[in-house]
Image: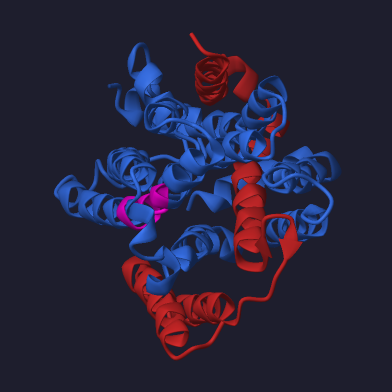
Chain colours: A red, B blue
Amino acid sequence: MSAMWIAVLATAAGCYALKLTGLIVPERLLASPRLRRFAELVPVALLAGLVAVQAGAKGSALVLDPARLAGLAAAVVALLLRAPFLVVIVVAAATAALLRLAGVG
Amino acid sequence: MATPHERGRPGDPVRDDTRAVHPGRKDARAVRPVRDGILLGLAVGISGLAFGAAAVSAGLSVGQASALSLLAYTGASQFALAGAIASGGSLLAGATGAILLGSRNALYSLRLADVLRVRGLARLLAAQGVTDESTALALAQPDPAAARAGFGATFAALYLTWNAATLAGAIGAGRVGSPAALGLDVVGPAAFLALIWPRLASGGTERAVAAGGAVIALTLTPVLPPGAPVILASVAALTAVLGGRPDVARDTATEAAQ
């Protein structure tokens, strides 16, 4: 087996093991209020971090992509208007796509 | 699979107390998470084109690119390995970095264990489905049944689309068009924002944690490898838990589920 295949399969095995870890943690550990609260808040922190990076970065560079930011701003407006999930997504993507079609970004 | 009533304990953050009262509403409520999950999976999965193209141009074979999408099934880690190989770094360092980037899925599955409540062999399958998308969609649902439906729908749609798109990108279809022209690069962040939106409205702690996570991730982006800043955003959650009083934490946890 080539070294490349070993790297691919080792990465796959490691990634899978990490996903499984949280699911097989004994329930009594999650009974701890602090760990439980941490587990509840951690997706909020990670997803907010992800939104920020996907909105304002490309690789390791901070970038201002006007079409992308306008798409997200449109999503915020839709959320404030209590639009359903599907509408929020379509409005965001359509805003960015139309601006790019018009030559912005 | 056990129902939440059988498995539920007092103090569960997500409980389905309404189903016993309105059993007929269950089917109608299951439609929305499934529909939303399928849309999210299809829209985000298209970016597998970019991964397939990046992997092959980095020097991976079509089979290796597909194996990563089928088996690792974690966008951030896959891009990290391809990037490390493209830059000529050692394979050991590349694989180690890619696996470390997968650690945010361990944090997600820690939370999902309590919501999905899968047991036995089903855990082995559910584990593979743990991604940003399936986690965000599951945690945005009002009860465990909807959370499981949303998780399953997102997993199925994203897994199929991501893998088909990886293969297409690896054999050269990525050159045909750019997902950005369709605004698909905005789908991910817009979806994650929409899915954490109810949590942001539910309490000041949630808003502070989200703001902290965003600031940490952006601040560290120029100085750390891609992916690492997002993982360190979890420090915002750690700070809130260590800084907050446990009794307050328990109260807000119960509120958040309502």
Residue at the image position 27 percent from the left and 22 percent from the top: B1
- Quarter of the view holding residue B206: bottom right
Provide residue B178's location: percent of width, then percent of height: 41, 65
Provide residue B121's location: percent of width, then percent of height: 34, 12
Residue at the image position 50 percent from the left and 18 percent from the top: A5
Tell me if B21 is positioned left or right of A105 in this view. left
* Depicted B69 relative to depicted B127: above or below: below
The residue nearer to you, when weighing A100 against B192, is: A100
The residue nearer to you, when weighing B175 against B33, is: B175
Q: Quadrant of the C terminus of chain A?
A: bottom right
Q: Can residue A31 be seen by looking at this rendering?
A: no
Tell me if B253 is positioned left or right of B127 in this view. right
| Number of marks in the rendered image | 0
Residue at the image position 55 percent from the left and 39 percent from the top: B58
Provide residue B174's location: percent of width, then percent of height: 38, 55
Task: Farthest residue to the bottom: give it.
Answer: A102
Provide residue B28's location: percent of width, then percent of height: 17, 54
* Depicted B167 relative to depicted A47: above or below: above
Residue B46 drawn in magenta: yes
Dominant secondary structure, magenta: helix
Residue B202 drawn in magenta: no
Tell me if B203 is positioned left or right of B112 in this view. right
* Depicted B133 relative to depicted A52: above or below: above
- Quarter of the view holding residue B238: top right
Q: Which residues are magenta?
A: B41-49
The residue nearer to you, when weighing B10 against A36, is: A36
Q: Can residue B202 be seen by looking at this rendering?
A: yes
The residue nearer to you, when weighing B204 against A46, is: A46
